[in-house]
Structures are given as C-alpha cells and as structure tokens.
Amino acid sequence: MKRRPSRTTIILGVLLILVVAVGAGLFVYDQLFGLTGPDDTPPEAPTLQAAAESQQVVYRIDPGQSEVRYNTNEIFLRENRSGSPVGVTQGIAGDVLIDFANPANSQVGTIVINVEQFKSDSGLRDGRIRKEFLESSKYPEATFVTTELINFPESPVEGQEYQFQIAGDLTVKETTAPTTWEVTAVLEGDTLRGSAKTQILMSTYNVGPISLAGILETEDEVRLEFDFVAVRVVQAEVSEEAGS
C-alpha cells in the first residue's frame, strides 16, 4: 500500500511551487520592464584645464544641483486622454572654461549625461524606455560635444544674466546629430548657474516615437531642458588632476 504524502509535505510543495513561480515572474518582468533600478553613480567627463597665470577659470558641473529633463506628449489610446511625461536625471558631468581676458576663447567641454538614470512618475514607463528604446544598459550615456559658442558675451561680469547659443553634436546610442541649445546663464561668485533647452526628434536617434502595443503613443518631438550649477575649480585641484 502506497504511503500518502502528509499534509505538511503537500503544503511545503505548494509553497515551493509558489516561490519558483514568483521568482520566474519577477525575472521575466525585470527582463521586459526593468524591475531593478539603475546605478545612481554620476558619470565622468573629460576635464578642462585653465592656462597657468591666465584669467581663465574652469567651472565644473555639480550633479547634485543640476538636472536634465525630457518632456514629450503621449496619448493613451484606450482611455482617449493625453499627457506630458517628464523624465529627470542628475547623472551629469562636464566642465566650462571662461577666459575673462579673451571671452572668445571660452570653451564648453564634453557634457556627459547618464540616460539610464532617467526617472519619471512611472517605473513601468522608465523600464520600457530603458529596455526597448534607449537600450541604456548597452548605451548608458549620451554626450554633447560643443562646436561653437554663438553670441557669447564679449565681457562677462558677475551678476549679469546672459543669453546665447551653444551649437554642437549630440550622440545618443550610436547616432550623432547637430543640436543647438538656447542658454541663459549668470555668474554668482564662484558659481556659474543657468539653464539650456533644445528640441530633437526621437527618430533621429532611433529611440522613438514610442508606441506600446495599442496602449499609448508619443509624438516624435521631445523637449530637452538642462538646469545646471557649475562650481569654480581652484587651480590646485586642476593641477592635481592633470598630474594623476
């Protein structure tokens, strides 16, 4: 006569099946939507160095006080309503060099943005964007390389707000395209503070428009905004970095 399994054995077996099922479900969900969040470590960017015994000053972006935002329009097809999601990242690095003796020689160094760290009001949206559109586990960083400063102030002074343009090349994933930012900036003591904005097409960089299985669709156009605070780098710090 076969021995029937005890009640305890049956319960343990059911619990084991549930644990395996939940684990498998979480694994699949993570692969599809990105359950685990990205690393919040700020990226690194090439540094600029002021010439010795000059009136050049390097300002370094402080990621804790800066952020890049994306904003686009989306339509929820089943609910027939629209929205304008905003994604934010503080994963930013870069230098700005101002030459007060000859402002025409001022430079904006390479700006590096960790796009994997973008967060909106929806973890589901963020996960899908990371996995399927930005592919940020493979391409975690976008870069902007300046090619020209347009209408940069001829004699920048502290406390005066200036408006100018920065033209350059924005690289997302494997695509590089020209982009021009409208910039407003002001010097406040040892701090350079300001904002920049531009508009791009997601299709240019092969990251959209976003369409999710009859649930929602976005416009192709996306607005990018950059609020920055850059802090003066003292010469001793610059020299130490150059020697390392």
Image: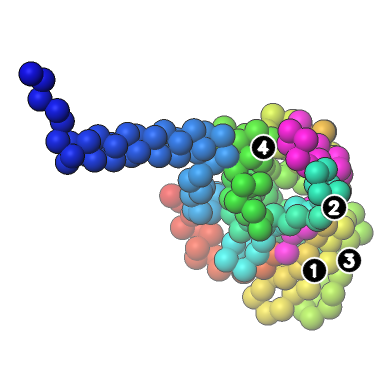
Quick one: label 1 or label 3, which is nearer the N terminus? 3
C-alpha distance separating marks 1 and 3: 7 Å
155 left or right of 187? Answer: right
Identify residue type, mark 4: Leu
Identify residue type, mark 2: Arg
Residue at 73% across, 43% down: 145
From the image, tell me which residue sits under label 1. Answer: 185
C-alpha distance separating marks 4 and 2: 25 Å
Residue 200, quarter of picture = top right
Q: Are marks 3 and 2 in contact (CB under 8 Å)?
A: no
Q: Nearer the viewer, residue 1 or 120?
A: 1
Residue at 64% across, 53% down: 122
Q: Does the magenta stretch include residue 219?
A: yes
Identify residue type, mark 1: Ala
Quick one: label 3 or label 4, which is nearer the N terminus? 4
Residue at 57% across, 39% down: 33
From the image, tell me which residue sits under label 4. Answer: 134
Q: In front of the other: label 4 or label 1?
A: 4
C-alpha distance separating marks 3 and 2: 37 Å
From the image, tell me which residue sits under label 3. Answer: 163
Q: Residue 81 carries which label?
A: 2
